[in-house]
Image (tube, grey):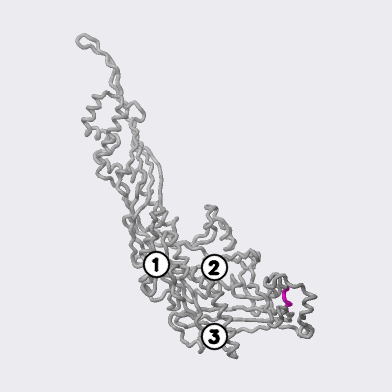
């Protein structure tokens, strides 16, 4: 089997490899997969799922999670907010042909050619108010607000705003769900930094009802995974496959460019044989002289 | 089963090789005395061209790799025993005639000539066959127990100002010579010119003090003079062979260059050089929050490199733990 029949360079990573890479990412960059309010810095045991960073994360004082602002309760005029956390606790990838992740019927199995399935375990939690708080708390009235709380200098400037009251809670109410996504890679661009561009083409929670709630959560997680998580995974994947090839560039002083599709190869990247494959051509750098 | 596969087509390996060749420069100077003749050299060379051919024997064949001589100075010295005419007086036709002693080859050494051979030497060639060899490099300066991030941060004591050098472990693939051959000295037909120059030089140096008519006589017998030089330097009829033997055997310059090229390929210039663990996400600075996110790195295991007639294939697995 000739890997470079239609390109000068070839690189591939299989699904076992990418799943190990994802595991290393979760351990070494937990803040990419865990989000929560300041409460969780003081009480990390309140997270829905324990975070297991590597020893180096602790040694270098890296955060275990990305700190988010509390969730403002609508109708409270920014006065009341809830602690919350969202965690992606497990992430597994299955390149075509799908033989690891069972697609829910909504995603019309089997997995299409040139696509990949991603199964994400998601946990979310909210700090629900104590009964005592519910019995005693009253929203400040506009008059009270005028007397007791200084008016912000510039309401549009967040630093000038009075922070909201965080609803006290006895603990975090959690739920965990499995989410299955189907993704594909956009055709590689003309430069190596546009080599791997994943996009989500289908998303489905397993066993979540009612449908409206399911759609809303899917919508939020679709955004989060597409905009935040996948670019980082793609970056890591790209580095893992590009690193051996970068030697050519450094040593030989050539330019590496994605092999064009469909002229030279039908798909680039190609998702097949339980792998993601990329094809790259060498372009000799011409001397200016 | 490997997790990572990379393949480089023959054109890519050729580009690798060209890059290696472009970085090779060698300078040396040495000398010695061989049978009463002093000889020393001062050379500088670089490599050019060179075609490669991948084989199904897991090797790369190199052909027509040219050694280009930037400087090739041969310095010859010879100390010829002094020859003197006897002094004394004799009576001729009743007159006493006294002849003073006259000596040649009194200087020490008499012959002291530097030749620039670079214009007389054809581009020498190296040929050979190389096989990929995988090596796992642990820097000797890395203390036991140093973690991978500290090793990455620590400067390489051998190259402390280079930010790309550190004490991290590395997977490296070298092209190790299976065999190599060098055709070091191959003179053009212009050796005759070289010899003529040699005679002219001798006229201006060794025989500088003798009368002009005597020089004319000597120049009239250039052939015997070349034989004379041959006797001195022991090169007899085949000057270019003598020079080849001098550099190849007496100096061992061919082996020296061959060993240097081999060492350059097999020990100093990896064609694959990967830090282990391999960074996949760079560190991220967050000055406002007062921390820097550590880079995400994956351990690489079981790296292998195999060559077939189409390509060089590098495979590796992703380790489970750092």
- Name the quadrant containing residue A256: bottom left
Which residue is under mark 1? A281
Residue A109 horizontal/vertical position (percent): 47, 87
Span shown in magenta = A162-166
Residue A114 in sight in this render:
yes
- Asked if badge 2 and badge 1 are on a common chain, one would say no
User: In the image, which disc is placed on residue A204?
Assistant: 3
Numbered mark located on residue A251 in the image? none
On the rendered image, what quadrant is the C terminus of chain B found in? bottom right
Instruction: In the displayed orientation, state which residue is furthest to the top.
Output: B94
Q: Chain of mark 3?
A: A
Identify the residue position indicated by label 2 in the image.
B281
| Left or right: B235 as drawn, with respect to B285 | left
Q: Could you tell me which quadrant the N terminus of chain B lies in? A: bottom left
Q: CA distance from mark 2 to mark 1?
A: 24 Å
The answer to which quarter of the image holds residue A218 is bottom right
B160 and B178: which is toward the camera: B160
* Among numbered discs 1 and 3, the one appearing first in the sequence: 3
Pair 2/1: label in front: 1
Residue B36 visible in the snapshot: no
Q: Secondary structure at mark 1?
A: strand
Query: Tag 3: Cα neighbours inside 10 Å, few (<14), some, or many (≥20)?
Result: many
**Which residue: 56% across, 68% down?**
B296
Task: Tell me the CA gap for discs 3 and 2.
Answer: 29 Å
């Amino acid at each position: 089997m000739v890997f470079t029949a239609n390109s000068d360079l070839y690189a591939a990573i299989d699904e076992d490899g990418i799943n190990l890479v994802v595991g290393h990412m979760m351990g070494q960059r937990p803040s990419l997969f865990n989000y929560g309010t300041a409460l969780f810095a003081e009480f990390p045991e309140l997270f829905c799922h324990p975070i297991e960073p590597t020893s180096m994360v602790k040694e270098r004082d890296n955060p275990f999670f990305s700190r988010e602002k509390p969730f403002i309760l609508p109708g409270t005029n920014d006065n009341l907010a809830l602690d919350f956390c969202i965690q992606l606790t497990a992430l597994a990838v299955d390149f075509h042909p799908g033989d690891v992740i069972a697609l829910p019927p909504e995603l019309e199995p089997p997995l299409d050619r040139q696509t990949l399935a991603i199964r994400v375990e998601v946990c979310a939690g909210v700090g629900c108010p104590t009964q005592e708080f519910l019995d005693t708390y009253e929203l400040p009235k506009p008059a009270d607000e005028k007397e007791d709380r200084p008016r912000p200098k510039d309401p549009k400037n967040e630093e000038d705003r009075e922070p909201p009251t965080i609803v006290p809670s006895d603990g975090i109410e959690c739920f965990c769900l499995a989410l299955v996504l189907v993704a594909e890679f956009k055709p590689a661009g003309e430069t190596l930094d546009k080599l791997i561009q994943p996009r989500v083409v289908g998303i489905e929670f397993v066993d979540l009802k009612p449908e409206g709630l399911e759609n809303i959560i899917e919508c939020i997680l679709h955004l989060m995974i597409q905009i935040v998580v996948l670019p980082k995974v793609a970056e890591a994947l790209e580095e893992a496959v590009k690193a051996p090839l970068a030697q050519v560039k450094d040593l030989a002083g050539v330019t590496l460019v994605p092999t064009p599709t469909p002229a030279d190869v039908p798909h680039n990247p190609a998702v097949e044989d339980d792998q993601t494959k990329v094809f790259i051509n060498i372009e000799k750098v011409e001397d200016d002289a | 089963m490997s997790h990572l596969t990379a393949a480089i087509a023959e054109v890519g390996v050729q580009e690798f090789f060209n890059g290696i060749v472009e970085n090779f420069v060698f300078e040396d100077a040495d000398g010695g005395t061989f049978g009463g003749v002093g000889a020393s050299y001062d050379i500088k060379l670089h490599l050019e061209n060179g075609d490669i051919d991948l084989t199904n024997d897991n090797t790369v064949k190199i052909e027509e790799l040219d050694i280009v001589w930037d400087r090739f100075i041969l310095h010859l010295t010879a100390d010829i025993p002094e020859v003197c005419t006897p002094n004394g007086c004799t009576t001729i036709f009743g007159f006493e005639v006294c002849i003073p002693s006259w000596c040649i080859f009194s200087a020490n050494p008499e012959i002291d000539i530097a030749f620039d051979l670079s214009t007389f030497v054809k581009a020498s060639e190296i040929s050979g066959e190389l096989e990929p060899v995988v090596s796992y490099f642990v820097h000797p300066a890395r203390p036991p127990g140093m973690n991978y991030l500290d090793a990455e941060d620590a400067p390489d004591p051998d190259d402390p100002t280079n930010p790309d050098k550190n004490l991290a472990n590395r997977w490296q693939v070298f092209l190790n010579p299976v065999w190599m051959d060098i055709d070091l000295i191959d003179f053009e037909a212009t050796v005759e010119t070289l010899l003529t120059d040699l005679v002219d030089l001798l006229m201006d140096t060794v025989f500088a003090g003798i009368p002009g008519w005597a020089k004319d006589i000597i120049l009239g017998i250039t052939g015997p003079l070349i034989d004379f030089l041959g006797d001195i330097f022991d090169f007899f009829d085949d000057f270019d062979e003598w020079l080849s033997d001098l550099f190849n055997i007496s100096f061992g310059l061919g082996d020296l260059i061959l060993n240097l090229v081999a060492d350059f390929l097999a020990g100093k210039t990896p064609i694959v050089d990967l830090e282990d663990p391999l960074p996949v996400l760079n560190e991220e600075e967050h000055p406002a929050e007062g921390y820097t996110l550590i880079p995400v790195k994956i351990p690489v295991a079981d790296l292998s490199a195999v060559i077939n007639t189409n390509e060089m294939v590098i495979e590796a697995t992703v380790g489970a733990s750092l």
